[in-house]
Amino acid sequence: MDMNHFITRRTALKRLLKISGSLALYASSAWSFRGPGSAWAKSEKKGLIVEGVGQTEGYSVRELTRKVLEAAGGITRFVSRGDVVVIKPNLSWARRPDLGATTNPEVLEGLIEICYEAGAKKVRIADHTIHDARRCFAITGAATVAKKTNADLIYPRSSLMKNMKLNGHRLDVWPVFVPLVEADKVINLPVAKHHSLSTLTLGIKNWIGAVGGRRHALHQDIHQSTVDLAQFFNPTLILIDATRIMIKNGPSGGSLSDVAAKNTLILSDDQVAADALAAMLFGYRPEEIGSISLAKKWGLGTYDFRQLDQKKVIL
């Protein structure tokens, strides 16, 4: 589906301002907002998935990132000149990149560069971390990437969390990290890893870092909660970092023995498909992972890859 058929998130907010003079309040000061194309029981096929694998010794992660996007038709298929792009990596833990708990900074850097080459007005990095954000951004390499690429690194704070109506099956009103809904385009950039509660944390699970509030409450029904968030944020693209995956002791890990090199990137505009293919790297069938199964049930995408334009890139 061509995302240009929908109004942007920023345009939607501006229209709300013109209509009401202020953002509409829901219940007790809750914003009511839906991302472009967000809807339950959505049957449209978005249609693409690209798997990139680095097989050459010493391959460039940044180059693999570029090749994967080229195979998808180029970044300009998704990002337009003048867009504000927000990238949502997983930076939750104050861990070195080689420990597999957080998004590879080389993938992040490559993606930012490509977005700017497409004419993006501004690229922002946003994640509501679990450990102290300043430490997380420094140790994971995100702060260095932001400085090098001139991307904005958004530090989570209460003033940037606004109650919004999610219209989920479990979640109704919840505090949302505002930069992610003010963006013209959103790219979900999770790391693939084991999770002690949800089995795996991939793209769908990564949205827990896009909200505030009592996040521990989200874990009480983690699969439905994360699917509710995934349908609300409905990103332009999903790029899963599986260059090194955490195979045990997730989500925080802490030992190199927890990590396996897969040298893989998975790009899709279908949240279910991206997670489904990533789950296979761990030896799971897609239907064995609760969030993937539920997301398919509620119409967020497919793990029948025959319905998609599949490509593979070897570097």
Image: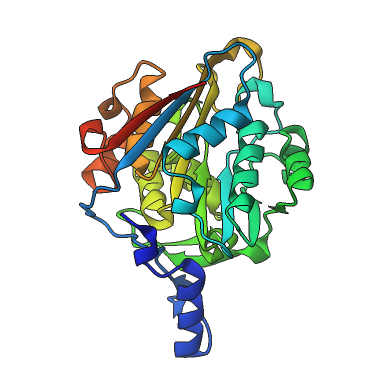
- Looking at the image, can residue 102 be seen? no
* Figure quadrant of residue 111: top right
Q: Give percent across and percent down for residue 115.
A: 59, 50
Seen in the image, is 86 located left or right of residue 287?
right
Q: Which color mode does the image show?
A: rainbow
> In front here: 27 or 192?
192
Relative vertical location of residue 167 with respect to residue 45 in this rendering, above or below? below
> In front here: 144 or 116?
116
- Looking at the image, can residue 88 be seen? yes
Q: How many callouts does the rendering have?
A: 0
Residue located 33% across and 40% down the image = 48
Q: Give percent across and percent down for residue 122.
A: 65, 59
Residue located 54% across and 51% down the image = 210
Residue located 30% across and 48% down the image = 46
> In front here: 199 or 51?
51
Relative vertical location of residue 135 with respect to residue 164 in this rendering, above or below? above
Residue located 59% across and 65% down the image = 82
